[in-house]
Amino acid sequence: MIQPSRPAPPSRLPPRTAELARAVRERREELGLRQSGLADLAGCSERFVHTVEHGKTSLRLDKLLDVLEVLGFDLQVTAGGGRIGGAPLDVRGNTGEAR
């Protein structure tokens, strides 16, 4: 069993990472789930849930998406100025329609 530990102080995590970690933890608690329960529902390990909630910066995307789906999060990716600036990216599928 994973022992409860304190999340890394927000100032030590990149802001977007801290925001995601906090959102996952708060939503799990709102739903009355333990880390082990969320892990069972998402098909991942309790350790994975723990690392998400503590802001690990490198995670398996497929597992993270499963956790977010169980929690009812809708992940949206939008183009902004980004690090390189310039025009927003236009991501198109095989049909030529924007995704």
Image (spheres, grey):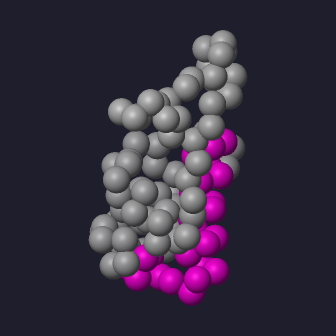
The percent position of residue 71, horizontal first and vertical second, equals 53, 71
Task: Decide if residue 25 is in sight here.
Answer: yes
The percent position of residue 70, horizontal first and vertical second, equals 46, 72
Q: How many marks?
A: 0
59 vs 2, nearest the viewer: 59
| Residue 2 as seen in the image, left or right of residue 98 | left
Which residue is drawn at the image coordinates 35% and 66% (left, top)? 47
Which residue is drawn at the image coordinates 68% and 28% (left, top)? 80
The percent position of residue 63, horizontal first and vertical second, equals 35, 58
* Residue 32 sits in quarter: bottom right
The percent position of residue 3, horizontal first and vertical second, equals 42, 74
Is 16 one of the magenta-colored residues?
A: yes
Is 22 one of the magenta-colored residues?
A: yes
Task: Decide if residue 50 is in sight here.
Answer: no
> In the displayed image of the protein, which residue is found farthest to the bottom?
32
* Residue 65 sits in quarter: bottom left
46 vs 31, nearest the viewer: 31
| Residue 66 as seen in the image, left or right of residue 24 | left
Q: Quadrant of the N terminus?
A: bottom left
Q: State whether residue 58 is above or below residue 20.
A: above
Majority SS type along the magenta span:
helix
17 vs 10, nearest the viewer: 17
Q: Which residues are magenta?
A: 15-38
Which residue is drawn at the image coordinates 37% and 78% (left, top)? 41
